[in-house]
């Protein structure tokens, strides 16, 4: 069964912008091209959310800065429509706020 991932772009304080795919299936490799951003964050992250906004997958997809970021859609996502959100994230050590 086809799982459709609808893309979204977050423009955060670092002006991160990306070219993103409009669909994908579980287990598929996805490539996102970060086209601009100042890189003032420690990693590029992605979330997959369902129709209610609940996070069904989250993780690091690459280092900061422009360029291609490739990751695999988790294979255990149930059939449905989802949002793919890509953003620059400042990840700090334990007991610190990200």
Image: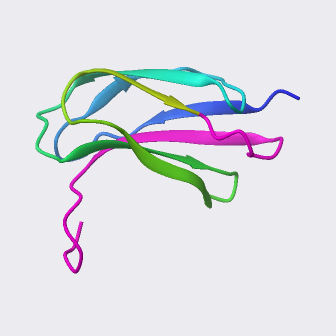
Q: Report how many numbered discs are placed on residues in the image.
A: 0
Residue 8 located left or right of residue 91: right
Quarter of the view holding residue 11: top left
**As drawn, 60 above or below 36:** below
Residue at the spot 16% in from the left edge and 41% down from the top edge: 14
User: How far across and how far down the image is residue 74, in percent?
Assistant: 64, 41
Instruction: Tell me, yes or no, whether the highlighted magenta stretch contains residue 10.
Output: no
The residue sitting at 48% across, 30% down in the picture is 71
Q: Where on the picture, by quarter, is residue 34?
A: top left
Q: Between residues 20 and 62, which one lies in front from this camera angle?
A: 62
Residue 22 appearing in the image: yes
- The residue lying toward the viewer, choosing from 93 and 30, is 93
> Magenta span covers which residues?
73-98
Q: Position of residue 68 (x, y in %)?
A: 33, 19
Q: Within the image, what quadrant is residue 35 found in?
A: top left
Query: Where, quadrant-wise, is the C terminus in this rendering?
Result: bottom left
């Amino acid at each position: 069964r086809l799982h459709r991932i609808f893309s979204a772009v977050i423009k955060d304080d670092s002006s991160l912008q990306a070219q993103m795919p409009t669909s994908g299936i579980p287990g598929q490799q996805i490539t996102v091209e970060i086209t601009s951003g100042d890189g003032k964050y420690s990693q590029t992250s992605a979330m997959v959310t369902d129709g209610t906004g609940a996070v069904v997958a989250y993780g690091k997809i690459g280092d900061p800065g422009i360029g291609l970021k490739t990751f695999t859609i988790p294979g255990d996502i149930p059939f449905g429509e989802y949002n793919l959100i890509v953003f620059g994230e400042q990840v700090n050590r334990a007991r610190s706020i990200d």
